[in-house]
Structure formats: structure tokens, C-alpha cells
Image (cartoon, rainbow, N blue to C red):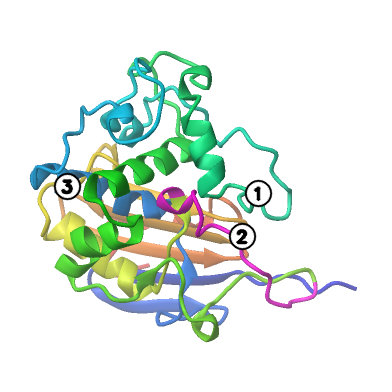
């Protein structure tokens, strides 16, 4: 009989020691999924502040895209580009992004005008594909690889070292299969990296929240962050990992929740409850 997978959770808050269950760790690298988009959006803001680009640049200024698509870097960052949620490629079920490499992205960028589903700027549709395009555009504007852009514009100013696309294999904490064995992660260090491919220790995610939302070291939070009432937040998920990071702007409490082998909404549910109940200080 298959073993039941046990949820592993790490909860870090603004005023309490980390709370760990199921063997989760604060010093192991875990997938942060779409929280990676915060790195991409912040890098966009910093490159704009440095004069390397403007958010309203058309995508064809930086990539070999058809002229006249109407898609700007701002549209990509705000999920209003009109591009679909996922790259329109055949996706193997076990590893949906394994075929989405640099060559595939170049091919798709070359026909962006045929891939938009709504006019740019008219509707919001969350798009991993759009953030892959945005990451490629940032790299082109900066004249260096996307990972170097993130390091220079985001991680180095915040003093964060444990956040990367390629963590040491012996420090990775992954989900488990039906028999309790570690499962291989999806391949997300290719073209989809700017949308969701980073790994980090939960401690590093907490440092990111403090630096970007609380102390605002690089400036005001990028528009990538979601705003709901008094909360500024973003989440992320892969096949086995879920993360929620947020700030209650009124009482300045913050929380990071990372879960492995959990329900899709588990990290969100815990994080929002702690912030809205005023329990980001670890109260129960």
C-alpha cells in the first residue's frame, strides 16, 4: 500500500521564531514557483530607474517580435499583454516546461501577434508565458543573462545569497511520491525561469519580503505584487511546493509560508489568516 504523503510546512513571521512541521527546514532550498515573478518585476523597475529601458517600451524594441503587437513591458509585468497563461507548446504531463527552452521562446516571440487572445492593455490574464517574454526582454536590455540581472538588481542590494535557479543538489528539499520517495522537480531553469523557476531557503524568502515590502530598499514595491485590501502579497506553486509571502500594510506585520505535499491553497490560507487575524507575531 502506498504511503500517505505528509504535509511539510515552514511559517516565518515578523515577530516570532520559525514554526516548522513535518521535517521542513529554513536552511534548505525549496521551489518558490511564481514568487520568482517578484524578482522579475523588481528587476524591471530597477532597470527603468537606471535608464536602461522604460516600462512602456514595446516588446519588439528588445526582442525579435513582430512590429505593432501593442505589447509593452508594462503589459507583460501587469498580466495585461493578452498572451495566454502558458506557452502554446505541447507539454509533457510529468514535466510541462521541459520543452520550453530558449529556441522555443524565440520561435514563439516571432509570432506574438498571432498568439494574443485579447487586445493588450484591455484585460488581465495571469500569464507565465508573458513573464518568460518579459525576462528575455530584460536580459536583452541589460546586455547580460537574466540571472545576472536579478542578482545585480535585486539580490545583491538586499544581501540575499540563498536564492538561485540552480541550488546545490544536496540542499534541496522536494516533494515526495506515493511511496514517500523524493520526486524530481519540474524543469524550470529554461525559458520559463523568469516566471517561476527560482529556488530559495525560506529564510531567504523572509529576507526578500523584509527588503522589498517592509524596508523597500530598492524603492516602492514593483507592480508584480498583488494588492487586496490592506495586504500586499504574492504566491507561487509547482507540482509539489506552495509558497505565500505577504505584508499587512497597516500593522506592518509580514509572513512567509512554504508547504510541500500540501493542498494547492494551503500556503495562501495559512498566510492570509495569520495576517488578517493579526497573528503574524506567531499567536494562535
Q: Residue 198: which quarter of the image?
A: bottom left
114 to 95, vertically: above or below: above
Residue drawn at x 43%, y 48% is 195
Distance between the Cα atoms at labels 1 and 3? 31 Å
Indicate the quadrant containing the C terminus: top left, top right, bottom left or bottom right: bottom left
On whether residue 192 falls in the magenta region, the answer is yes
Q: Which residue is mark 3?
A: 47
Which residue is found at the position 25% from the left and 51% from the top?
143
Cα gap from disc 2 to disc 1, whole angstroms: 7 Å
Crowding around mark 1 (Cα neighbors within 10 Å: few <14, some 14 to 19, many 20+) is some
The answer to which of 269 and 84 lies nearer the viewer is 84
Query: Residue 253 lies in magenta, yes or no?
Result: no
Secondary structure of the residue carrying tag 3 is: helix
Task: Locate residue 265, reporting x and y percent.
Answer: 53, 50
Look at mark 1 in the image and give the residue it sits on: 96
Q: Which residue lies under the disc numbered 2?
A: 186
User: Quarter of the image holding residue 260?
Assistant: bottom right
Callout 2–callout 1 Cβ contact below 8 Å: yes
Q: Quadrant of residue 253?
A: bottom left
* Element under disc 1: loop
In whole angstroms, how far apart are the C-alphas of marks 3 and 2? 29 Å
Amino acid at each position: 500500500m502506498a504511503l500517505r504523503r505528509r504535509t511539510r510546512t515552514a511559517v516565518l513571521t515578523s515577530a516570532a521564531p520559525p514554526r516548522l512541521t513535518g521535517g521542513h527546514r529554513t536552511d534548505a532550498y525549496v521551489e518558490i514557483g511564481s514568487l520568482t515573478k517578484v524578482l522579475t518585476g523588481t528587476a524591471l523597475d530597477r532597470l527603468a530607474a537606471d535608464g536602461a529601458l522604460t516600462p512602456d517600451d514595446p516588446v519588439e524594441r528588445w526582442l525579435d517580435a513582430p512590429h505593432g503587437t501593442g505589447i509593452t513591458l508594462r503589459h507583460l509585468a501587469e498580466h495585461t499583454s493578452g498572451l495566454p497563461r502558458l506557452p502554446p507548446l505541447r507539454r509533457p504531463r510529468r514535466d510541462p516546461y521541459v520543452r520550453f527552452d530558449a529556441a522555443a521562446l524565440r520561435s514563439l516571440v516571432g509570432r506574438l501577434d498571432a498568439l494574443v487572445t485579447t487586445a493588450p492593455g484591455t484585460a488581465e490574464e495571469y500569464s507565465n508565458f508573458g513573464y518568460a517574454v518579459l525576462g528575455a526582454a530584460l536580459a536583452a536590455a541589460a546586455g547580460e543573462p537574466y540571472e545576472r540581472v536579478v542578482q545585480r538588481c535585486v539580490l545583491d542590494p538586499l544581501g540575499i545569497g540563498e536564492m538561485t535557479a540552480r541550488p546545490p543538489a544536496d540542499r534541496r528539499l522536494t516533494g515526495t511520491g506515493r511511496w514517500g520517495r523524493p520526486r524530481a522537480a519540474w524543469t524550470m531553469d529554461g525559458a520559463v525561469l523568469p516566471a517561476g523557476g527560482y529556488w530559495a531557503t525560506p529564510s531567504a524568502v523572509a529576507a526578500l519580503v523584509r527588503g522589498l515590502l517592509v524596508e523597500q530598499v530598492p524603492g516602492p514595491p514593483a507592480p508584480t505584487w498583488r494588492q487586496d485590501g490592506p495586504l500586499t502579497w504574492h504566491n507561487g506553486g509547482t507540482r509539489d511546493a506552495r509558497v505565500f509571502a505577504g505584508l499587512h500594510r497597516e500593522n506592518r506585520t509580514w509572513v512567509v509560508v512554504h508547504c510541500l505535499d500540501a493542498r494547492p491553497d494551503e500556503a495562501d490560507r495559512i498566510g492570509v489568516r495569520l495576517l488578517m487575524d493579526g497573528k503574524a507575531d506567531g499567536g494562535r
